[in-house]
Image: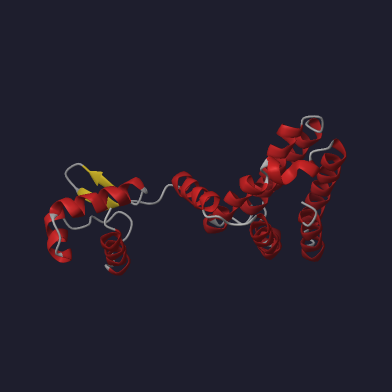
Amino acid sequence: MNKPLIQRFQDYLLTSGLTVGDTIPKEMELAEIFNVTRGDIREVIQHFAQLGLLKRVKRRGTIIQELNNEDLNRSFAFCLQMGGFYFEEMKEMRMILESAIAPLIISRITPKNLEKLEQNLAEQQNSLDDSLRFEELDSQFHVLLFSCCHNRVLSLFTNILPILFQKKYRERLLSRSWREIGYHSHCRLVEVLRERDLEQFTKLILQHIMPT
C-alpha cells in the first residue's frame, strides 16, 4: 500500500470541503489530481472503504459515509491493544477521564440512564459468586457511566476498559470479598448520582478506580 498517497488522499478529504453523503470525484479525475494511475487510486479508495469511511453506491459513485460506531470502536480498540501501551498509562488515563467527565454525567444523566445502572447493580448482586460474569458487569457499569454523557467521542474511550479488565491485570481482584467491595462501591456511586452530588461522585470514582 502506498502510504504517502494514502496520507495525501486523507489530507485531500479533510481540506476539500466534502462531508458525509457527498460524492467524491471519479477515479480518473482523482488520478489526474494526484498524478498517479487509476489503479493506485482504486487501492486507496478500497483502503478507506474498508475503514468504513467511503462507500460505493450504484449510479452515484463513491460517497463519504457516516462512520459506523461499531466499526470505529473496533478499530480504536484494536489500535489500543496493538499499540504497546502500558497498563499504568491506560489506568492513569481512565482515572483522569472518569473524574473529568463527572460534571457531564451529573448534568446529563437521565432517568433511563439511572434505570440501566440500577439493572446492572441488580445483576452484579446476583453474580457475586460468578467471577467471570461479575467482571463483565463491572466493566459494563463504567461503560454506562460514559453513556450518561451522551457524547459519542467520549464513548470511544470506553474501549480501554476491556483491556484493563483482562484477567492478567485483575488476578488480585477476583476474590468474592473484592467483588463485594466493588459492588457496594458501585451502589454508593449510583446513590450520589441520584443526589447529583458532583463533589462526592468525583471523590468516590477516584477511590473506586485507584485499587484496581
Picture quadrant where residue 22 is located: bottom left
Q: Residue at x 72, y 39 (%)?
A: 135
Q: Determine the image quadrant of residue 26.
A: bottom left
**Is residue 116 in view from this perspective?**
no
Residue 39, percent from left and from top: 16, 50
Left or right, 98 with respect to 182, comes to left
Rendered view: 178 above or below 160: above
Q: Identify the residue at horizontal 79%, vertical 47% (top origin).
A: 186
148 or 51: nearer the eye? Answer: 51
Kindly identify the residue that appears in the image at 56 percent across and 57 percent down.
151
Foreground: 147 or 128?
Answer: 128
Q: Percent from the top left, x then y, of residue 110? A: 67, 51
Q: Coloring scheme of the render?
A: secondary structure
Q: Is residue 50 left or right of residue 196?
A: left
Give the farthest residue toward the right: 177
| Residue 35 in view | yes
Q: Quadrant of residue 138?
A: top right
